[in-house]
Image (cartoon, rainbow, N blue to C red):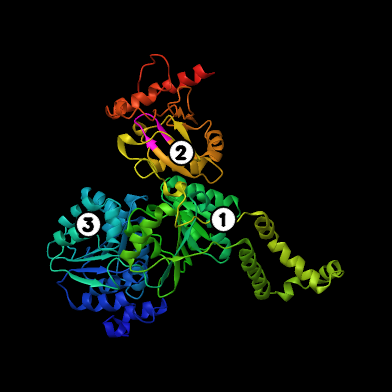
Amino acid sequence: MKTFEELGVSADLLRAIKELGYESPMPVQEAVIPYLLNDESSDVVALAQTGTGKTASFGLPLIQKIDLSLRKPQALILSPTRELCLQIANDLKDYSKYIPDLSVLPMYGGTSIENQIRNFKRGVHIIVATPGRLIDLMERKVVNLETVKKVVMDEADEMLDMGFTDSINTILERVPEDRTTLMFSATMSPAISKIAKNYLHDAREIVIGTKNEGAKSVNHVYYMVHAKDKYLALKRIADFYPDIYAIVFCRTRAETQDVADKLIGDGYSADALHGDLSQAQRDFVMGKFRQRRLQILVATDVAARGLDVDDLTHVINYGLPDDIESYTHRSGRTGRAGKTGTSISIINLREKGKMRAIEKVIGKQFVAGTIPTGKEICEKQLLKVMDEIEKVQVNEEEIATYLPEIYRKLDWLDKEDLIKRVVSLEFNHFLEYYSNAREIAIPDQGKSSRKDKGGDAAGGRGKRGGERSREAEPGYSRLFVNLGKKDGMTPSMVIDMLNQNVDRRVDVGRIDLMQTFSFFEVKERDAAAVVRSLEGLTYNGRPVNVELASTDETGRGDKGGRSKGSAPARRGGKKQREEEDFRKFFDDDTPFDDGGAWYKKRKKRRR
């Protein structure tokens, strides 16, 4: 392995990075630094995971090549987020500690543009900017990029994912054509390839590891649970790792806040980070997390972009993201700088296929984890308490005056009793919780729960298309709900509705979606509980009605169904079949409309 000096890094930079603790180059630095120092003309696409030392790999050569006598922008670094922009700018300032004449200016939104304009007019060598703020300054005729010779796009894949493609095109069109362009990305997506093809010339591709693979130092573990048990599984994982320092990734802002609120309510050191927070709130939360005043940060993918934190023990996926690139970025936040980290995914059976697809791309297999039992968690926590007691620093002078009274107060206790009481003081809440907590049921991965699979009309037990039977399968009850395709109803919405409102595991059978209403099947034993749990539910401001579609006096099956012998009459097309289903609720000429009010009339008549 070469040293930074052997790579060609100058003495002033060597002195600064040595003080920062840089001992030997990381692979991406060893590959990129000499190339950028020695080859002025070639563009570069460097693929490497987050946390592998990319900032130093482009930052050190940029600083070393700056002409300090020309106080104009010579290098431009584009960043997807304010947080990453500030981080890069601060790193460059640390590297150039012994080059006092070098000027680095971060430009980003959410703060005073006037201050940035004033600082720019004083003269700048390197601009670090988010695309939106940079274009704003360019349109105000403040920033001119005609002297820029180097353009760096850091986390390029994230910039494109966040919708900055047009902004990047605009910026690159206004930079001299003879510039050198450097793209740093964790993944090689089609969008990255397109940008590289349009704006890079004879680019050299430097790949650290394998394209799109996950970080080698990250272990990938999954816990298979029922959807309704995800939070309970998260609690057990957090309890099983007492020194956890983790980001929990959720899919939506609402889910992020909900999970964070639950963790805080249960006594965990946690907080939420999502787009509904103001910039000041986000800065406050991220500050707490960086300073380790929080153990668990619950975040959306977008909000966590640019959050660079060292020594994360875990990344926890509260469900898998829709795209593999997001998973790569998530997992790459742990196991950094050569350390080992763990990416945990809490999934249900519906996500198993997505997990297999991720495995193929990252080139690593997920290891099945076993949810810790209450006893295992209590043992872990007890060891932590004993370890803390053993390592506590005793300030003899400070407590000396209090000891006589303490000895007198505890004199009646022998050593064994005293130890038991000290340990119990810290440990009793775990014993109390897990002595009554039920163990989490693990789905049968051979024959899955309908609730987790989300079986629908096409994938259920009945026939497909117009010949599907309207009778519930043996052991199941058929339920009616006054929401259909016009309301945006999908099989997953039915599953989510049950997961969020029914406090027990429910096996769901076939789901039939009509335009203005739907049917779904649940186990007979669960039907009454489901109807009761969904009472009072609203959707887009109107009441949701769920009730049993029972057999009527004509013997034609459920009230939303058809008789076994009526198949020919059901062949007239979707709308005719749907109206026939509707008619079975009425024995008069109630007009067939969009379903907004007819179910109310039915309920009124039944009363």
Mark 2 highlights which residue?
521
Q: Residue at x 58, y 61 (%)?
A: 239
Q: Quadrant of residue 328?
A: bottom left
Q: Position of residue 604 (x, y in %)?
A: 50, 18
Q: Earlier in the sequence, mark 2 or mark 1?
A: 1
Marks 2 and 1 sit apart, C-alpha to C-alpha, by 24 Å
Q: Nearer the viewer, mark 2 or mark 1?
A: 2
Compared to 373, does 94 lie above or below?
A: below
Q: Is mark 2 in CB contact (under 8 Å) with mark 1? A: no
Q: Earlier in the sequence, mark 3 or mark 1?
A: 3
What's under tag 2, amino acid-wise? Answer: Glu
Residue 191's tag is 3
Q: Earlier in the sequence, mark 3 or mark 2?
A: 3
What's under tag 1, amino acid-wise? Answer: Ile
Mark 1 highlights which residue?
440
Mark 1 Cα within 10 Å, few/some/many (few <14, many 20+)? some
| Residue 514 covered by magenta stretch | yes
Can residue 253 be spotted in the picture? yes
Compared to 48, does 304 lie above or below?
A: above
Q: Is residue 152 left or right of residue 13?
A: left
Magenta stretch bounds: 512-519
| Mark 3 residue element | helix
